[in-house]
Amino acid sequence: MNFLGLVQYQRGQFSQSLEFLKQAISIYPANPVFYLNLGRTLERLDRLEDAFTVYKEAINLDSQFAEAYYCAGSVSQQRKEFDIALAYFDQAIERNDSLLDAYLSKNSIFCSIQEYEKALNALNQAISIHPNAAQLHLGLGLTYEERSEPGDLELAIASYTKAVMLRENYVSALFNRANVYQKLGLWDPAIKDYQAAIAQDLTFAPAHTNLGLAFYKKSDYESAVQSFENALRLDPTHAQTYSNLGVVLYESQKLIESLAAYEKAIQYKSDYFEAYSNRGNVLKELRQFEFALKSYDEAIAINNKFYEAYVNRGVVYFELNRLDEALADYDTAINLNPDYALAYSNRSNVFKELGELPISLKSIQKAIALKFDQLKNKPLERNVLSQKPMQVQDASFVLLELHSLLERNQISFFLAYGTLLGIYRDSELLPHDKDLDVGLNWDCSRDKLLQVLQQSGLYWIDPKSSNSTNNQYNFGVVEKRRGISIDFFFFKPEGSYFLSGFHHLPHPLLWRFNGFELGEITYKYKIFKVPVNPEIFLVDIYGINWRIPDPNFDSLVSGYNLVESSKPLSLIYAYSRLFDQLIEQNWKKAYGYCVQIKAFAQIDSKTLEIMRFLELSIDV
C-alpha cells in the first residue's frame, strides 16, 4: 500500500496516493516513514496544517527521524512561522548533519527577513562539515548576490565558480554566475557561461533569453535576436522575451517587426505597461503620433508612476508642437524620479523652443550632471551604438528626386552647408552627415514649397513647419520611405551679406555669409545650383581648414560665421549635443563638445570635471 501510494504520488495523482498511504498506516500504524510520505502528499494537496500534524506523529514514533523534523520545519516555513521552522531545522541537523536541505532552508529564511549574516553563517556551518557540496556553494553565491553590498558580486562569482569546480557542468551555477557577470558589465564571460549552460540543457529557456540580453548589451543585435527567438520556441508565451526582442528590433530599425513583438508581449501580458510604452516608441518613429499617444496613455493607465512613459509621451507632444502638454509630462516624470536625466534634457528643449534660454540652459546642465554622475559611478549598462548617420545611397536618391520635383514646379534652390561641402570637396554626400541641406532665396514662397512637398505625398512635414511664414528662416521635412531629413534654409540679404539659420525665440540662430551669386555643379549627371564661388561660402562657416574632414565639427556650435546674438542659443545646443554623446557613450565626441563649450568662455565646473574625466579615459 505504501509503495502504491508513492507510485501515485510520482504520477501526480495525489488524492489516490493519499488513500493508499492511509491504508498502509491503518495496517501498520507504527512505521514513521508511512507518515512522512503521507505528510508530503498532504502538502501537495495544500493541506499544510494536516501535513504538520502527520509529521509530528512521525517524530513521536521516532524521535531521531531527522527528515521528519526537516519536513515539519518546511511546512512551518511555508506558513511564515519562521521561529518554529528554524527550531525544527536545527533539530534535523542535530540528528543528521548531512541533511543539506535543512541548512539551505535556514539560509532561505534568513534571506527572506534580510538577516544576511545569519544566512551566510548557516551555509558556512554546512560547508565546514561538507566542503565539497556544490549546492551549498551555489546557495552562498545566491546569498551574496541578494545582499549586494560592496564586493558581494565578486564573492558571488567566487562561490559559483567553486560550485562549478565541484560539480562539472553545473547548469544552475553557470547560469547564476553569468547573471552576475552581466550585472558587472562583463558581457564576454557572461555569454560564455550562458552558452555552457545551454550546451548542457538546450531546453533552458531563461538561459537563451539572458544570452540574448548579453548580446544586446554588446550591441550584437543579430545574435540577440537569434537567442530570443530560440527562447520563444521553447516558451512561446513569455511576454518579457517578446518585449526584449522588440527592443532589439527597434534599435535595429526593424520597426514593423518590433511593433509585432510588442503586440505579442501585450497579448500574453495585458498589464505589461513597459510594452505599451515601448510600442508607443515604435509608433512615434513611424510618425503614427496619435496611435503612439494612445499607447502611452494605456501604459500610464496601468501604472501612473511609470515616469518613462511620461517622457516618451512628452516627446510626441513636442513633435506635435503641443509644448504645454510636453512640459507637463516632463515635470511629472521629474517629480516621480528626480534623477531622470532625460526628462531634464527634454524639458530644456521645450524652454529652448519657447525662447526661455536661461531656464533651458539650467535644465540641460542639470541633465548632463545627472547623466555624468550615473556613468561615472556605475559600470556601463551596455555598449550603445551611436545614432546612425544617413545612408549616402539613400540620401543621394532623395536629393535627386527632390531636384526633379522642385524643377518641375519651378522652385529654384541651391546646395548649402554640409551637402555642398560633401559634393564640392568629395564629389559625394558626407558619410557622417545626418540630413540634406538645401538653400533658397528669401523671397521664395514658403507656402508654395510646402504645398508642393505635401501634394507629392513623399514627405512628412514637421508640424512646426506647417505654421511657416514668409519671415521664417527654415523648416524641415522627412522623406517617408527612407527616413532622410531635409532642412530648407532661406537666405536673407543684409547689405553685402546673407543671413541664414534656424527660426527660434527670442532670436533666430543665424550665420552670416559673404554675398554670392549662383553658379552650377554636376552631381550624378544632374546640374545643381551652388554659390558661384563655393570655397568662399565654405570658408565662411567651416574656416580655412574646410578641406580637412572633421567629424566633430558642429556648425550649430562652432560655425565660424555665427552671429554674435546667436551665441547664447548656440551654447545651449552645445550642452544638448554633449548630453547626446554621453547617452551614446561616445567619449571622443563628448570631449569635443566640452572643448567647444570651453571656447564660449562660459564653461561650468561640471563640464570641466567631465573634460578631466574624459582626458583620462580617451586618447586626446
Image (cartoon, helix red, strand yellow):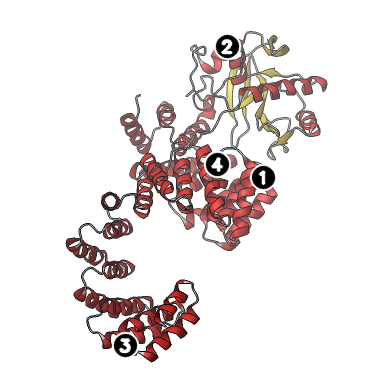
Q: CA distance from mark 2 to mark 3?
A: 93 Å
Q: Which callout, 4 or 1, points to the residue nearer the camera?
A: 1
> How many numbered marks have been drawn onto this rendered protein structure?
4
> Which residue is labeled 4 in the image?
349
> Which residue is labeled 3 in the image?
57
Left or right: 571, with 413 as reference point: left
Expressed as whole percent of the image width and height from the top left, the position of residue 447 reads 78, 31
> Which residue is labeled 2 in the image?
425
Q: Nearer the viewer, residue 449 or 7?
A: 7
Q: Which callout, 2 or 4, points to the residue nearer the camera?
A: 2
Residue located 35% across and 28% down the image:
618
Q: Residues within 10 Å of mark 1 (few under 14, many from 20)?
A: some
Q: Nearer the viewer, residue 2 or 46?
A: 2
Of the residues shown, which amino acid type is indicated by label 1? Answer: Leu
Work out whether 274 lies above or below 559.
below
Quarter of the rendering occupied by the C terminus: top left
Expressed as whole percent of the image width and height from the top left, the position of residue 5 reads 43, 79
Q: CA distance from mark 1 to mark 2?
A: 37 Å
Of the residues shown, which amino acid type is indicated by label 4? Answer: Asn
